[in-house]
Amino acid sequence: MNTNMEKIIIARADHGISRSLLSPNGIKVLYKLKENGFTAYLVGGGVRDLLLGREPKDFDVVTDATPSQLKKLFRNCRLIGRRFRLAHLHFHDEIIEVATFRSSSDAPPEDAPDEAPQASPEAAPEEEVPEPERDGRRRRHGHGPSMLKSEDGMVLRDNVFGTPEEDAIRRDFTVNALFYSIADFSIIDHVGGMEDLRNGLIRTIGDPLVRFTEDPVRMIRAVRFASMLGFNIEQRTEAAIGELSGSINKATPPRLYEEVLKLLLLGAGERTYQMMRHCGLFEPLFPHFDAWLARESDGFPHARVGKALEWVDQLLGQGAQVSAPLLIALMFGEYLEEKVAGFRKAGASPQLANDMAVAEFAGELASTVAVPNRVLIAVREILSCQQRFQKTPGRNGRGVVGRAAFPDALEYLRFMERLTPAKRSLADWWLKYAAEQPAAAAAADAGEAPQQEAPAEAGHKKRRRRRRRKKPAAPPESP
């Protein structure tokens, strides 16, 4: 990948990043690498967010130290990944990710999952692969070919180390390729990221058609960053998304599920949804749902999806947690309710119709966005509770409150009452009832159903067990 951008260095006096805004652990890592003769920079979203006055979610470091050198230098280091080895430095309250500069030739996908799952703090580190010592030359990492691509240009594996300039060029978008140097507190810009940051643009580094072919998920990431930051997608980048949107399903369904979840839980879900439909990414991810959206019901368009995502954005803005099951239930609720109604019309019982609707929905998504079974089970519970809420309290009301899905189901009910205000709020009634059931509420918080003692049969007293008498000991035989 070739770029003709000149490197720009922004001195400390000309930018707003202060060391006081950085993670103390991140500063320790940067200084320790510097003191041991290595080049090290803060990179990526942390730099971008600090320049925008946002609070970074994490602090990533890039360096010319190899993974094996990082392992020797930091006692709290665990190496992860096989496609490209990364170092996770474990501190008490956070993990600092440290990567070695990568080559820009045939750039790899930044967020593609490695061949093996990433290690948890409790997991043992992977076996180290020997590497040449640091000598300023490009190093190959791992065994066998250093670069592997599919026939259509999608990167499958990359293990090539490079220089700081190459590392910047191989990143996805210009605003994510800025380096912060601990040596002189400057910002180093190899790709025009500062200008795009000022202009509010998401632009790929290099030809967007090539970059999106290498890793189709970058198209979702472009929408995610634009929505999260309130930016626009640069014209050529947006045109490439429109042209290649159908290739998004080359990514694995589990990975697409994780990416969609990130997209819609950023606090700008409604804007993200509209951008996804505008760019052409929504239809290949949710083909059946998208076809349903294109059809009107009783002469009215399906506007509830946007309202549901606005509700999610509002909850997130208030600092509330929104679970994956609640997000999916809200977003696809009207669609699922129509399925339930169809099965009910065919003669299924309410519970069976609910189960069949969610099962059919799962089948539709299996080949595109694979929602985990545990999430779908919780979605089914949320929808099932809506029927049960109509009885106050009905039989075994405490059992309803004790369900693990009760808090999410109650939030779903609140949203529905917001769409069609009722004279009597069932959500308020159940919230008050739950507060009066401390044992059930505690069980619900723990994600367990409360244990209830089985009632004795009417008209019968509980029988007391009779103790068996011991037989008297036999008298001793006479001599």
Image: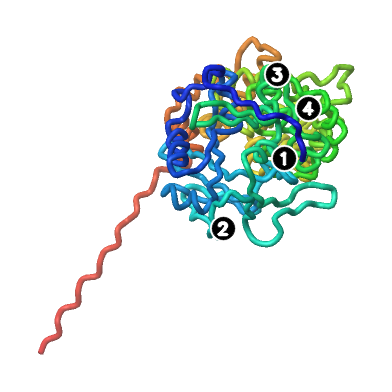
Q: Please tell me whether mark 3 or mark 1 is closer to you in this view.
A: 3
In the depicted structure, whether residue 260 falls above or below residue 128: above
- Which residue lies under the disc numbered 3? 200
Give the CA distance from mark 1 to mark 4.
Answer: 13 Å
Percent x, y for residue 73?
44, 49
Point out the tag, 1 or 4, that comes first from the N-terminus.
1
Q: What's the residue type where badge 3 is placed?
A: Gly
Return the mark for residue 131. 2
Q: Which image quarter: residue 468?
A: bottom left
- Which residue appears at 44% of the width and 36% of the height? 31
Point out the tag, 3 or 4, that comes first from the N-terminus.
3
Q: Please tell me whether mark 2 or mark 4 is closer to you in this view.
A: 2
Neighbourhood count class around disc 1 (C-alpha, 10 Å): few under 14, some 14–19, many 20 upward = many
Q: What's the residue type where badge 4 is placed?
A: Met
- Which residue lies under the disc numbered 4? 276
Q: Please tell me whether mark 1 or mark 2 is closer to you in this view.
A: 2
Give the SS element for disc 4.
helix
Q: What's the residue type where badge 1 is placed?
A: Leu
Give the SS element for disc 3.
loop
Is disc 3 in contact with disc 2, using a CB cutoff of under 8 Å? no
- Which residue lies under the disc numbered 1? 256
